[in-house]
Image (cartoon, rainbow, N blue to C red):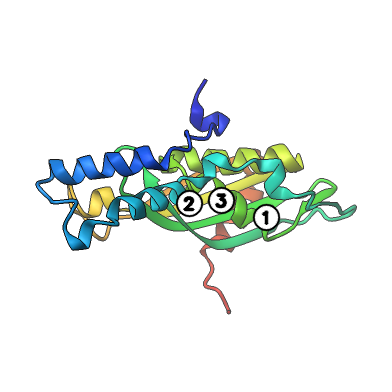
């Protein structure tokens, strides 16, 4: 079973993480006992635990019953420019960006604040952008059973900016279209138009 698909939490052993960070510092030729680094292993352990806290989250608990009947609500719901911060699973370097999420209700809607929380749940794992895009879309489809879901992620990857090809201005866009967003060109076009507009706020 894929632990990313199942959302399997990592073992909660921060002491072990701290020891591993100390070993990394030694391998890099640093002195973990010097003043500036004494507390670094503990800080890194806490930071990693937070940045991968999405493994510990359960979708049902996150939603907390914030799904409501909304008969007659059948127009597109779009939440744009949801900022997210994740880590590339290949180099454990950040990728940061914005998510645009939309769905077509079929009798049920979700509290708007829950959509960014769903994005965060999948962002706070070791990730690849392509998989994260699909996970967000599938989660919304599973909990709401809407007529369709559309998700677009735009991100800048520090593994491309800080190392490797070192292309600081590059960005990556991924999308996942389900239901009407995939089968109906008009619905898909409306979503793409709404996400590309400049905000009036």
For label 3, count other residues whose C-alpha is less than 10 Å away and answer few (under 14), some (14-19) or many (20+). many
Q: Is 111 placed above or below 52 here?
A: below
Q: Nearer the viewer, mark 3 or mark 2?
A: 3
Q: Residue furthest right?
A: 71
- Closer to the chain start, of discs 1 and 3, is 1
Residue at point 67%, 55% (across, down): 114
- Closer to the chain start, of discs 2 and 1, is 1
In the drawing, what numbered circle is on residue 189?
none
Q: Which of the two residues, 139 or 55, is positioned nearer the viewer here? A: 55
Residue at point 18%, 53% (across, down): 33
Asked if residue 91 lies left or right of residue 99, the reply is: left
Q: Residue furthest top?
A: 1
Residue 170 % position (x, y): 28, 55
Dot 3 falls on a residue whose secondary structure is helix
Which residue is label 3 attached to? 119
Q: Quadrant of residue 19?
A: top left
**Quarter containing the C terminus:** bottom right
In the drawing, what numbered circle is on residue 114?
1
Q: Which of the two residues, 45 or 135, is positioned nearer the viewer here? A: 45
Which residue is label 2 attached to? 153
Residue 137 % position (x, y): 60, 42
């Amino acid at each position: 079973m894929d632990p990313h698909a199942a959302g399997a939490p990592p073992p909660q052993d921060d002491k072990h993480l701290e020891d591993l960070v100390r070993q990394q510092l030694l391998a890099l030729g640093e002195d973990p006992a010097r003043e500036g680094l004494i507390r670094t292993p503990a800080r890194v352990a806490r930071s990693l635990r937070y940045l991968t806290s999405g493994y510990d989250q359960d979708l049902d608990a996150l939603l907390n019953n914030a799904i409501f009947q909304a008969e007659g609500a059948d127009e597109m719901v779009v939440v744009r420019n949801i900022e997210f911060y994740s880590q590339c699973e290949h180099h454990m370097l950040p990728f940061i960006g914005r998510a645009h999420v939309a769905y077509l209700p079929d009798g049920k809607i979700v509290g708007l604040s829950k959509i960014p929380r769903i994005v965060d749940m999948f962002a706070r794992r070791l990730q690849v952008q392509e998989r994260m895009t699909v996970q967000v879309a599938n989660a919304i489809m599973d909990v709401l059973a809407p007529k369709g879901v559309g998700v677009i992620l735009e991100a800048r990857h520090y593994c491309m900016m800080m190392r490797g090809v070192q292309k600081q201005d590059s960005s990556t866009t991924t999308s996942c279209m389900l239901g009407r967003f995939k089968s109906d060109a008009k619905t898909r076009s409306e979503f793409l138009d709404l996400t590309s507009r400049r905000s009036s706020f």
